[in-house]
Image: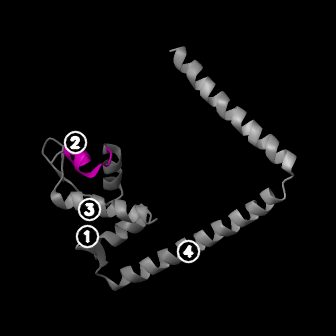
């Protein structure tokens, strides 16, 4: 299938498909004309890549993992022992990031809790005025076109 059909089947933009190819995640066949020709296996690869990106993995990590995954009834199943170790390390990294974000949010909550009521009121009024200005600016810009 050609690029436009691949985009339709996967919901992934052409630029992103090219990026996946540059990163070694996807290897479509090239026709003598230079056009890319994708297979059903490429559709599945893109779906795997999207799933792993959603899980928080980088494209460089995904490039290492793809050869060690198989699809089993809609689930990605590791096939290499090293992959399991890498996934555990990635999970630990994510857990540490989540804990750091919870700590940061807690500190921000403490600051916000200590904010005097009159400042909170002024901030909410200023925020509403700012949002109204954004809408008005957008409308004025659209009207001038």
Q: Is residue 115 left or right of residue 91?
A: right
Q: Is residue 72 left or right of residue 64?
A: left
Residue visible at 62% across and 72% down? 99
Among the two numbered marks 3 and 1 on one chain, the one whose residue lies closer to the N terminus = 3
Among the two numbered marks 2 and 1 on one chain, the one whose residue lies closer to the N terminus = 2
- Measure the C-alpha gap from mark 3 to mark 2: 17 Å
Where residue 57 sits: x, y (%)?
44, 66
Residue visible at 70% across and 64% down? 104
- Measure the C-alpha gap from mark 3 to mark 4: 27 Å
The reply to whether discs 3 and 2 touch (Cβ–Cβ < 8 Å) is: no
| Highlighted magenta segment, given as a residue range | 3-13
Among the two numbered marks 4 and 1 on one chain, the one whose residue lies closer to the N terminus = 1
Tell which tag, 2 or 1, sits nearer the viewer: 1
Q: Which mark is residue 95?
A: 4
Look at mark 3 in the image and give the residue it sits on: 45
| Foreground residue among 66 and 145 | 145
The reply to whether discs 3 and 4 touch (Cβ–Cβ < 8 Å) is: no
Look at mark 1 in the image and give the residue it sits on: 74
């Amino acid at each position: 299938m050609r690029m436009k059909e691949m985009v339709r089947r996967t919901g992934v933009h052409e630029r992103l498909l090219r990026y996946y190819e540059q990163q070694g995640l996807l290897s479509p066949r090239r026709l003598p004309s230079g056009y890319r020709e994708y297979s059903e296996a490429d559709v599945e690869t893109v779906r795997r890549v999207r799933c792993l990106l959603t899980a928080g993995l980088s494209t460089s990590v995904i490039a290492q993992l793809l050869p060690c995954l198989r699809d089993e009834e809609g689930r990605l199943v590791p096939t290499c022992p090293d992959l399991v170790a890498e996934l555990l390390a990635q999970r630990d990294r994510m857990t540490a990031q989540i804990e750091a974000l919870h700590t940061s949010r807690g500190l921000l909550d403490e600051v916000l809790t200590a904010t005097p009521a009159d400042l909170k009121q002024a901030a909410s009024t200023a925020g509403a005025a700012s949002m109204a200005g954004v809408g008005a600016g957008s409308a004025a810009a659209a009207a001038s076109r």
